[in-house]
């Protein structure tokens, strides 16, 4: 209990007891003490009011920061959406054009793609046909070369036999 009184004395300092006069305490000392306590109470009340105002200001600041955080998060979300939209616009040259024109360009791109595929197929077929024609021409040239070689050999044999007869 002595410890509690000591802590209370530190918070609100107590004055020494009043002088005892004929009937009770000295009135001036009591009045001075009460005025001192009222001054101290006014100081504590003003500290309390300042603390309440400061706490209210801090609460408002927290609310403001929270609302700014929500706005910032919303702005980040919007920025991400716009970045995605920009990326789509840059990746697709026909994006953002009117619906009908966009449809026409899409059809044209599909038709161009089909024509490209057909051209590649035609080139492949022509290349294959050309390779077959070249192979056939080689075989024909080889066969013709052999026939001419045999014909030459045969003529050479006939010419040699005729010379032998004449001699």
Image (tube, rainbow, N blue to C red):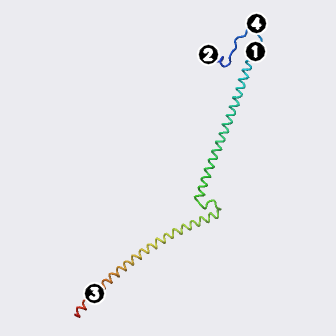
Task: Name the quarter where the N terminus is drawn.
Answer: top right
x and y, in percent, of residue 37 in the image: 73, 18
CB contact under 8 Å: marks 2 and 3:
no
Q: Earlier in the sequence, mark 4 or mark 1?
A: 4
Q: Nearer the viewer, mark 2 or mark 3?
A: 3
Name the residue carrying label 3.
156
The residue labelled by disc 1 is 32
Q: Are marks 4 and 2 in contact (CB under 8 Å)?
A: no
Q: Earlier in the sequence, mark 4 or mark 2?
A: 2
- Residue 39 lies, with reference to residue 126, above or below; the image says above
Q: Which residue is mark 2?
A: 3
Q: Residue furthest front?
A: 167
Tell me, yes or no, whether the two marked residues, 4 and 3, touch with CB atoms within 8 Å.
no
Q: Spatial distance from mark 2 to mark 1, Cα to Cα? A: 28 Å
Checking the image for residue 21, the label placed there is 4
Q: Are marks 2 and 1 in contact (CB under 8 Å)?
A: no
- Distance from label 4 to label 1 (Cα)? 16 Å
């Amino acid at each position: 209990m002595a410890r509690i009184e000591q802590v209370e004395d530190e918070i609100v300092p107590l004055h020494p007891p009043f002088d005892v006069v004929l009937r009770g305490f000295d009135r001036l000392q009591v009045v001075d003490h009460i005025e001192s306590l009222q001054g101290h109470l006014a100081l504590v009340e003003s500290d309390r009011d300042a603390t309440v105002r400061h706490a209210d200001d801090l609460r408002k600041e927290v609310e403001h920061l929270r609302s700014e955080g929500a706005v910032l998060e919303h702005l980040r979300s919007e920025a991400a959406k716009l970045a995605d939209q920009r990326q789509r616009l840059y990746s697709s040259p026909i994006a953002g054009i009117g619906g009908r024109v966009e449809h026409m360009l899409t059809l044209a791109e599909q038709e161009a793609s089909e024509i490209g595929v057909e051209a590649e197929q035609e080139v492949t077929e022509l290349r294959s046909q050309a390779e077959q024609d070249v192979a056939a021409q080689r075989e024909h040239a080889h066969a013709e070369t052999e026939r001419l070689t045999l014909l030459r050999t045969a003529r050479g044999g006939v010419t040699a036999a005729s010379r032998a007869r004449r001699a």
